[in-house]
Amino acid sequence: MAGERASVPTLLTPFAEVRARRSATQRALRMLRRNRLGLLGAGILSIVVLAAILAPFLTPYDPMTGDITKRLTCPVLTRCPSFMPGATPVRGTLDHPLGTDQLGRDIFSRIVYGARVSLIVGLAAVLLGAGFGSTLGLVSGYYGGRIDALIMRIGELFLAFPYLLLAIAIVAVLGGGLLNVIIVLAIATWVPYARIMRGSVLSAKEQEYVIAARAIGVRDLALLFKHVAPNCITPIIVFGTFNVAAAIIAEAGLSFLGLGVGATRPTWGNMLADGRAYVATAWWLATFPGLAIMLTVLSINMIGDWLRDALDPHLRNIE
Amino acid sequence: MGQYILRRVVHAFFVVLGVVTAVFVITNLTGDPVQLMLGEAATAQDIERVRRELGLDRPLYVQYLNFLSSVARGDFPESLRYRGYSALEIVLDRYPRTIVLAIAALLVSVTLAITFGTISAVKRYSAIDNVVMLLALFGQSIPNFWLGIMLILIFAVNLGWLPSQGYQLSPAYLILPTITLASPGLARLTRLTRSGMLEVLNSDYIRTARAKGLRESAVIFRHAFKNAAIPLVTVIGLDFGVLLGGAIITEQIFQWDGVGQLLVNAIYSRDFPVIQASVLIIAVSFVLINLIVDIMYTWLDPRVRLT
Amino acid sequence: MADPRQEPRTPYGAMNRNLSRRTFLGLAVGAATSALLTACRREPEQAAPPATVQAPGPTPAPAQPTPRQEAIRGVEIPKFDNPPAGRPSGSKPEELVIAWGVNQLTTHGLDPQRHVGTIAESQLRHMYEPLVAFDRDLQTIVPALATSWERIDDLTMQFKLRQGVKFHNGEPFNAEAVRYSILRPLSDETPGDSRSTYAVIEDVEIIDDYTVNIKTSRPDPALLARLTGFHMTIVAPKWASQGPEVVSREANGTGPYRLVSWSPNEDLVLEANEEYWGGPPQIKRVRLVTISEQATRVSALRAGDVHVAKDMPPEEIESINASGRARALRVVSNRVPFYFITIEVPPYNDKRVRQAINYAANVQGVIDAILLGNGYRIATVLPIWAFGYDPTLQPYPHDPEKAKQLLAEAGYPDGIDIKIWYIQGRYPKDKEVAEAMAQEMAKANIRCTPELREPATLNDLQKKKEAPGLLFASWGNWFFDADNTFFPLFSCAQAKDFNFDWRRPYCNEEFDKIIQAARVEMNVDKRRQLYAEAQRFLYDDAGALFMYQLVDIYGVNNWVLWEPRHDEMIWAHEMKWNE
């Protein structure tokens, strides 16, 4: 496997390029069939995505509001702990298959709706971070010199900065909310994309076809986007996939510190953060959102593994 | 070589300066600390008085220059929250605790990752490889504050084997926070070690070494390992920064009174000098570690261009 | 839990128990003799049930929420059947560890006179004492460093001081120390955070080594109670005059414990003061710690790492009692959480809207569901044992229909959109209570968005005068007098001092007249009437979203014998090892 290499673009583009890409797609599909974990990951993720899209049709209750008198009802088939002495023991029912939370809201409904926020936060943060980072990396690598030095120094500055402080500062200045959390996570993660992109650009710049294109007077920007970017995109996609998983966990971490996307919005991070006070008393509050996060992140990581193996076996060092 | 190191040091200095400046600007954007210092019962006059006392009524650039000059003199301003204590004094007092935790987590994750990553690579596609990789996948997918709470619940509350929280310089107190802090990095490093080792094991010179009839253990430990370690060293350097930052949440769960917890509390109470001092210390540690890593890198891999 | 106010009252008992406080205030009018003065101290039938040390029982009984009745000022407050201490497990601890969720020893370090926080008070009062103190019933004022007192005229009270007392560093306790200490937090050099509360004190005259006269600038009916405040504790004068840096880092009081070590990064460690005038405490070494994460605090208690822990979640009461290692003890607390209403801005400037909020919030329902009954509903913001409390005023009932009707009358037939700003982690279930009330209010067309505000942001936004509608506040009246609630929270003077921002939004001239009159009214009955009037006014004006008094839930290790207090004070010298 190590001997295989994504086809090296030559001056014979674009035909060779197209063919190479098509064959990469075919190989990816073949690998997917072979790689059962990747298939499993794709399966789980599609369930999550479907649930997020179809949330209003799947959920029996409003995820935002509940009945406080039905607070902390346990999941179906389990026995509810009694918090009041002398209370008759109750069993969970199908009314609330995963039980209710500390305000009497249906946990199943909240998890289904929570998938929306987690996926949006994960995807948007990565798209924003990757877009921003790789643009800077592209500029940095292509122009080199002072611009390069400046961008890379700023990048190091960001890496040396505890991102939590950055997050708290931004939330404190702008206030919480979905958009701000996405921005925070994007800002915290743009540097690696820039570095990957810059590295790829630097090596691509040495390729004959780029030198040739320059020689025949193709403008810089056109050159960048037409010829260099497509060759650097693979590592970005692989890295980005893993980062979606990381962003979902990071959102939970921000919620843990009370800096999440908003208190009543059903998100897995919020549910987990609220549920942590109940781990010893009402285990289902934190367990199910925890499982939801874990499964989703797991499935994305599995897909990431598969993508990496399939698209470029030389990218093993990217996690 | 000497010139290279000098250049790295100068460069590191500017990164630290940049961090300090950024922190100064951001902390000042986030609001006024005086109200928080004085509490509920303070009146507007009290607040004005204290603002004057602390020089917070002066223009921002004056505050910044004062701040820089006092940092340069190593004479940090007084903490706003702990009046009468220099911010640096408080941060340095707590620094060893965070470093102990970060180093423990680093040691654990590096040792285990290299062990399991190597086993996994050598016994590729075996049952043990599958188990290790699956565990690593899970390790990467569990939010670590969740893990921390579960560990307390199981090992301190239910089993009663380990203390639930608190800072003590004894292994018993270190175990749970270390596992919590180390787990994401451990999973990552294990996977990296495995893939790095695999690549090296498939390379020509290893085949040559094998062909010479060297024992497999000698091949792995003497030849393969050193080469596989090169990318690991960089990752470990970067990871150390992640550990220092990640300690914020771990310290919060385990009431481990280190710089991370100090920083969070300082942010909540707008204790500017302590925020600045903590960030400075964390940034300097990170930059230093990476400076060392860079230098080690040139030693490990002479091919690295000294630019 | 049934609403305790539905239980039949015992008017005679109530009157009896009222006697002590009424007596002292009566005396304060000035026509008193010193013979009567001693009578106002502890009388057996007036004191709260003695702090019985529980005998070790074989099995901890389950916590029964059924209230035993205890009458204070004609109000029945629930008394919990707390389980006795079980058999202690393991070996006897070397030191007692007490855990709170918040660290307040920050801005002023160990300086007892300049803090305002109740947790700091609880911790520092181990080392420092005032002249007089409230007994556990929060009704009787008992001698501490003063042995007796006497009202000389409307502006003067005389105190006889305890003789032979020494500070921890050997300095003698005398009139000079009292004069120095009482004036210290009022000075411009070392102003206390709650200076305005004591601004009425004008001077302390030294009559002889063990007699002082405390002079006020106006008649102050609450002076004696005021002097129980922990800002009025007595510090060693020679030592303290070295400056606030010294007082915030070291400690030299007269209290039952002396300082072993403390720094901003370290726990507060104390040891018994073997020369304490009241006899040395039984527990010799104490460590006071902060564990901010609630789940961790509970775990630490259940693991035996902490012996007394404050603010246990109500859901854990059963499991703590069943743990065999600790038990949960409950008392009605002096602390009153409530929500300010941003009263200057429409629609909240309409009284009917504010009333509608009070009708819609379903506070009792929230207490029952979220706090599992561990809250004591009150009509306004005054705790039941505060002087001036009017037991006849009934809390706003839950009535969403009435709320809708009031909103329609005020011109909002479709309801209103409001925000509720809350904080998290400082008080039990603070977040959930806010969210649950928001959920309830929505049923009356008050569409309420809960917004968690980090404390610092909260203050900044408050200053910008954003008007969310409801804004979290919490008050622990520390000398159990209506003056210490109404003046700091609802007076025009304070509103002005705070620039009318949302920390003190309430200023109503009519209400102000009443509470200002009560501040200088030396006739006890008239003063009580004035405060009754004030409560009715505030209630009808719906000056805030009125809620409840907390029920404090303590986790206590079986090695420790202790009866919790109503005033949030956790004092090691009131505890004993269970041997």
Image (spheres, rainbow, N blue to C red):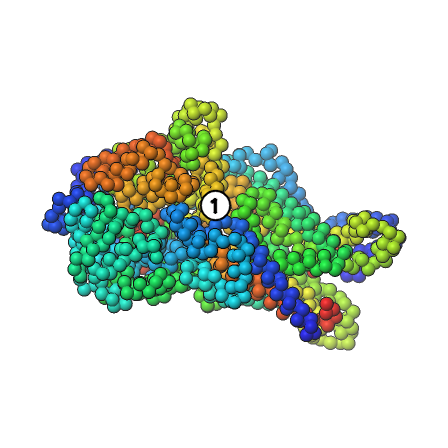
Identify which residue is drawn at 17% across, 37% down.
Answer: C12
What type is the residue that disc 1 sits on?
Answer: Asp
The residue where tag 1 is placed is C460
Identify which residue is drawn at 78% across, 73% down.
Answer: B208
Q: Secondary structure at mark 1?
A: helix
Identify which residue is drawn at 24% across, 61% down.
Answer: C177
Identify which residue is drawn at 20% across, 47% down.
Answer: C155
Q: Quadrant of residue C522?
A: top left
* Residue C543: % across, % down: 37, 35
Residue A196 in sight: no
- For residue A76, above or below residue C319: above
Given residues A151 and C414, the one toward you in this image is A151
* Residue A15: % across, % down: 87, 49
Q: Chain of mark 1?
A: C
Residue A187 in sight: yes
* Residue C537: % across, % down: 31, 32
Where, quadrant-wise, is the C terminus of chain A in this rendering?
bottom right
Residue C9 vs residue C406: left or right?
A: left
Where, quadrant-wise, is the N terminus of chain A in this rendering?
bottom right
Residue C559 vs residue C278: left or right?
A: right
Estimate how packed mark 1 is, as few (under 14), some (14 to 19) or many (20 or more) residues with alpha carbons within 10 Å. some
Given residues C268 and C467, the one toward you in this image is C467
Q: Quadrant of residue C22?
A: top left
* Residue A274: % across, % down: 49, 46
